[in-house]
Amino acid sequence: MELKTVLNDLRSFVEAEHKANYEKIYEIWDKPTHKKLESGESQKIIQVEKDDKHHIQLTLGENESRFREGDMICLHLGNPKEKRYIVQGTIEAEKEGEWLVRAYKLDDADIAAIASGCFADPDTMDLKPFYE
């Protein structure tokens, strides 16, 4: 097999995986918030506090979610397709009722907007610019 053919096949595979990943995320994001909370696909956050330059401390609501350490999340006020205040945050630590989340872009105005409550949904990292 020619190298060009292998690279084209690899690109096709990566494109298909990228598309499937976003379809799955959008499928979750499109669900009503109350349904996501019931199924564990979303987590109610009752307080957000900035910890340091790259960390926020989240106080969790009562629902149980599927999220665990290492998961990537976004924070929003009910519709992640409309506005995500924190993107590509990673849960670095969890203890009873709290998460420590690392995020590279922490805007004080965005944190203030969600400080008294928001929702966490799964997020993803778009690596497409690195291979285009």
Image: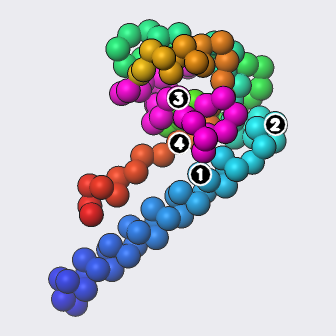
Q: Earlier in the sequence, mark 1 or mark 4?
A: 1
Q: Nearer the viewer, mark 2 or mark 3?
A: 3
Q: Is residue 104 magenta?
A: yes
Q: Secondary structure at mark 1?
A: helix
How many neighbours does mark 3 have within 10 angstroms: few (below 14), some (14-19), or many (20 or more)?
A: many
Q: Is residue 64 magenta?
A: no
Q: Earlier in the sequence, mark 2 or mark 1?
A: 1
How many neighbours does mark 1 have within 10 angstroms: few (below 14), some (14-19), or many (20 or more)?
A: some
Q: Are marks 2 and 4 in contact (CB under 8 Å)?
A: no
- Tag shown at residue 34: 2
Q: Secondary structure at mark 2?
A: helix
Q: 82 or 123, which lies in front?
A: 82
Q: Amino acid at mark 3?
A: Tyr
Q: Secondary structure at mark 4?
A: loop
Residue with the mark numbered 1: 25
Q: Amino acid at mark 1?
A: Ile
Across and down, in percent, residue 16 comes to: 46, 70
Q: Amino acid at mark 2?
A: His
Q: Earlier in the sequence, mark 3 or mark 1?
A: 1
- Using the rendered view, name the quadrant where residue 115 is placed: top right
Q: Residue at x 61, y 41 (%)?
A: 82
